[in-house]
Image: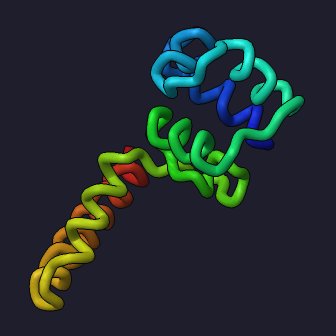
Amino acid sequence: MNFGNRVEELRKQKGWSQNELAKRAEISREMIIGRYERDESTPSINIAKRLADILEVSLDYLAGGTEQTVDKATLNRLNDINNLTPADKNLVYAFLDSFITKAKIQSVLR
C-alpha cells in the first residue's frame, strides 16, 4: 500500500472528509489531500509528519516502510518504558510477557 492509500484509509477510519483532514493538518486547500491520496503529489517531510501525527501513526508506516501500525498511545508508552531503569524495564517486560502468554492460551482454548 502506498502513501496515498494509507492516508485515505486512515482518514476514512476516523470518519473524516478530505476537508476535515486538511483543516486538522492546517493545509490551506482540501484538494491537496485528494492529490496526496491519488498519488498525484507528494507532501514535504514536514507535512507528511504532520499528517502522520494527526492520523496517529508513525511516519514510517505512512510512507510505506512498515505494514503494521502502532497507535500513538502505544508509541508513547513504549517511549516511557524506554526511559525506565533496567530493573523496572524487566518488571514491565515480565508482566507483559505473562499477560500476552495468558491471552494466547485463552484464545487457543476458545
The percent position of residue 10, horizontal first and vertical second, equals: 58, 29
Q: Is residue 24 above or below residue 66?
A: above
Q: Give the total of numbered labels.
A: 0
**Residue located 33% across and 53% down the image:** 74
Left or right, 41 with respect to 109, comes to right
Task: Residue 43: name its quadrant.
Answer: top right
Residue 86 place in picture, x, y as percent: 17, 90
Instruction: Give the camera-side residue of 3 and 36.
Output: 36
Residue 97 at x, y = what percent?
28, 72
Q: Is residue 5 left or right of residue 106?
A: right
**Quick one: 92 or 78, which is closer to the camera?**
78
Residue at the image point whose x is 66% and y is 53% from the top: 67
Identity of the residue furthest to the front in this view: 28
Tell me: residue 20, above or below residue 32: above
Q: Quadrant of residue 36?
A: top right
Instruction: From the top left corner, tell me how far across and down residue 104 is, in percent.
Output: 37, 58
Q: Quadrant of the N terminus?
A: top right
Location of the C terminus (image quadrant): top left
Look at the image and name its color scheme: rainbow
The residue located at (42%, 54%) in the rendering is 108
Would residue 82 be found to the left or right of residue 88 on screen?
A: right
- Residue furthest to the bottom in view is 86
In-front residue for pair 25/1: 25
Q: Is residue 82 left or right of residue 105?
A: left
